[in-house]
Image (cartoon, grey):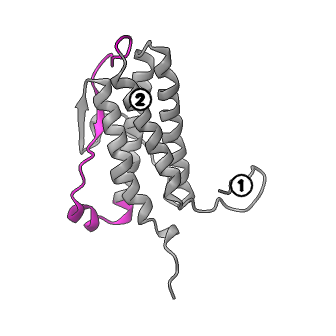
Amino acid sequence: MEWTRPGLSSPLRPICDLRVLDHFIKEARDAEVAMKSCREGCSLSESVSVPQTTVDFDVWEKKNGLDQAHEVQSGLWLLQQALGLLRTSVTNTALHSHLDNSIRNLLSINAVLHSLHIQEYTPPASAAELEGTWRVSSATDLLQVHVNFLRGKVRLLLMDAQACQQDVS
């Protein structure tokens, strides 16, 4: 994997290797498993908005790349907000590292999207402005949504990214 160092003028190469995402999914799953076995100090202080994770492939395929990207980016933003809140409400220190990891990985996925020339996402003033969301009130539900969102819409977006299509001429 190649990262460009600051100060070099070469643009960031598209990150098309899905093993990067697989690693993030594995870590999201680890966080979910750790949360399921947590007995104390691991609850969410209030319900949070999360993205829909179900994918209707016919609907998804009909959306243009910009709409797909926007849906994924708004979902990532919602998850960042939700995991941030969970991180502050969880007192179990063993979970802190899992949650810190998950939040860091969401930021890394945004960097991957940026490398694929997907334009910067401007978050809304509040989650209420986003459509296609629902609310969860348990930490395990939130972490399950996190895993499913990465496995579903994020993976689909990365698989079809224009910047990663091999020129087959």
Q: Position of residue 125 (x, y in %)?
A: 37, 35
- Residue at numbered disc 1: 4
Q: Amino acid at mark 1?
A: Thr
Q: Secondary structure at mark 1?
A: loop
Q: Residue furthest right?
A: 7
Residue drawn 38% across and 11% down?
41
Does residue 108 belong to the magenta stretch? no
Q: Nearer the viewer, residue 115 or 66?
A: 115
Q: Residue at x 27, y 35 (%)?
A: 128
Q: Nearer the viewer, residue 81 or 21?
A: 21
Is 70 placed above or below 99 here?
below
Q: Which residues are magenta?
A: 39-67
- Is residue 71 among what the camera can see? no
Q: Is residue 30 above or below residue 37?
A: below
Q: Position of residue 114 (x, y in %)?
A: 54, 54
Q: Which residue lies under the disc numbered 2?
A: 83
Q: Is residue 73 above or below residue 1?
A: above
Q: Could you tell whether 163 is left or right of 152 in the image?
A: right
Q: Earlier in the sequence, mark 1 or mark 2?
A: 1
**The residue under label 2 is which amino acid type?**
Leu
Q: In which quadrant of the rendered view does residue 90 lie?
A: top left
The secondary element bearing badge 2 is classed as: helix
